[in-house]
Amino acid sequence: MAAVKEHPDLEKARRIVLEAVKDLPAKVYLFGSWARGEQRRYSDIDVAILADGPVPADLFVELQERLENSDILYPVDLVDLHMAPGSLRERVLEEGVLWNE
């Protein structure tokens, strides 16, 4: 996989997501075009959260609102991998870039 290019909006999204899930035992992945280094001018930032169970709904909604209300210029598509189809989960785990340890 190509190295992820640094971008201020990518770092902002990373900070917002990691802060929101800091108390949740979860892994956070960047996936899609940004993870492959193939993003375009209108690409969204795809972020997946993999927890032991579903991400609590209130936390997920609050996180989506934080991202939408931020000054990030690109849309951020947030996915709870526990609720996602198996094919998407497999793709994220194979291609995704882990944002936290």
Image: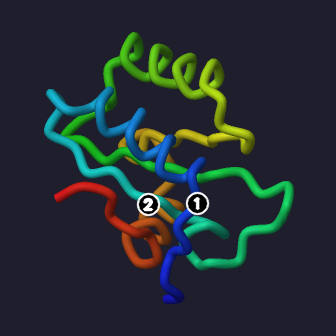
Chosen colour scheme: rainbow
Q: Which mark is residue 89?
A: 2
Is disc 2 placed on a helix, strand or loop?
helix
Q: Nearer the viewer, residue 96 or 7?
A: 7
Is disc 1 placed on a helix, strand or loop?
loop
- Sequence-wise, which precedes: disc 2 or disc 1? 1
Q: Position of residue 100 (x, y in %)?
A: 24, 55
Q: Which residue is mark 1?
A: 7
Name the image quarter holding residue 42.
bottom right
The amino acid marked with disc number 1 is His
Q: Nearer the viewer, residue 55 or 4?
A: 4
Nearest-to-viewer mark from 2 and 1: 1
Dot 1, crowdedness within 10 Å: few (<14), some or many (≥20)? few
Name the image quarter holding residue 34.
bottom right
Q: Nearer the viewer, residue 71 or 38?
A: 71
Residue name at image x 44 percent, y 69 percent: 96
The amino acid marked with disc number 2 is Arg
Dot 2, crowdedness within 10 Å: few (<14), some or many (≥20)? some
